[in-house]
Amino acid sequence: MTTRRSGQRTDTSGRRRAGRHSRRKSYKGQWLVVTALAVLGTVVVAHPDVAHRNSLAAQAVAGVDNAAHEAPVVPVVTPTPTPVAAPTQKFTTPLRPAPTLTRKPKGAKPNVLVSTGKLAVVPGFDKADGIRDKMTYRVEIEQGLSVNGAAVAATIHKTLTDPRGWQAVHPVSFERTDKPDADIRIILATPALTDKLCLPLDTGGEVSCRVEDRVVLNAKRWLYAIPAYNGNVGLYRNYLVNHEVGHALGHGHSTCTTPKTPAPVMMQQTKGLGGCLPNAWPTIKAT
Ligand SMILES: [Zn+2]
């Protein structure tokens, strides 16, 4: 028994010793764990990357494919649109030059004398600007003349529709056409062709005429006018058109009755003004 008791004691004391030793050992282990956690916490707090790596490791363990996560993270930069300045300059299509029926060689004098005898119709329309009786006309120009066909046609139409013109005297509206059925033909021709087209009238290479449906404007006068107009070629062209078309409207010739007042448009002003002043418009009368 003694042996057993002592043995028991021994065993008991041994257990006690062992128990004290075990508790002591346990305290020591707790301190080590606490210390380790403290150090780890410090590291985690001080280095967030460590936490990230730990997280990646956890994911790898969990079977998450972290290849994408390990790839360098490229920051997504949303491009800031660069404002484009609004254009401030307006580009306009250059106007095409008016078509010319005839061309002259560079440096050559304008031709108004050499006759080809061939007429060409100026293409295009100029619509009537009124609803009254329409009178259509077609512009024809002798080929080889040094003139711009479109410009000639524009001058004629502007003259015929001018507020001082025949449309203010007669219930008529002029319209330009290039069709063959025009009421009248307004022809610009060399003196030679003018003389032929004006027969049986005698234009003598100098003046213009109206015969039947033909209003023939002498190119020599169209380009050089007459001295009495004192260089105002534009005004003389107005006179020339209004005078000859006046014949087509049924008007005969007039004379200067009051010197130093405007000459009647139906006066043969090219042959002389008789003391009157140049005048191109039927609405402007002698005073
Ligand atoms: Zn006349």
Image (tube, helix red, strand yellow):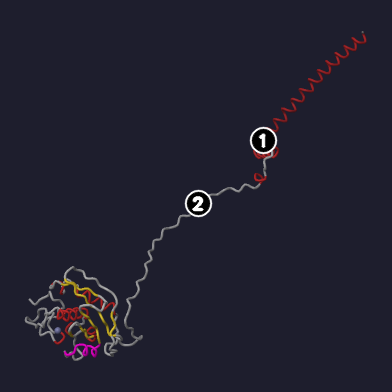
Left or right of 17, for residue 225: left
Counting from the top left corner in percent of width and height, residue 216 is at 21, 84
Counting from the top left corner in percent of width and height, residue 120 is at 29, 82
Check residue 86 in the rendering and tell me which mark sits there, or answer none: none
Number of marks in the rendered image: 2
The type of residue carrying mark 1 is Val
Left or right of 148, for residue 30: right
For the C terminus, the image quarter is: bottom left
User: Dot 1 lies on which element?
Assistant: helix
Question: Residue at (29%, 89%) from the top-left corner?
Answer: 116
Query: Which residue is label 1 attached to?
Result: 44
Q: Is label 1's Cβ within 8 Å of ligand 1?
A: no
Position above or below: 215 against 130: below
Position above or below: 37 against 175: above
Query: Which residue is label 2 attached to?
Result: 80
Q: Is residue 199 magenta?
A: yes
Residue stretch in magenta? 190-200
For residue 187, what is the image quadrant?
A: bottom left
**Outermost residue to the front:** 181
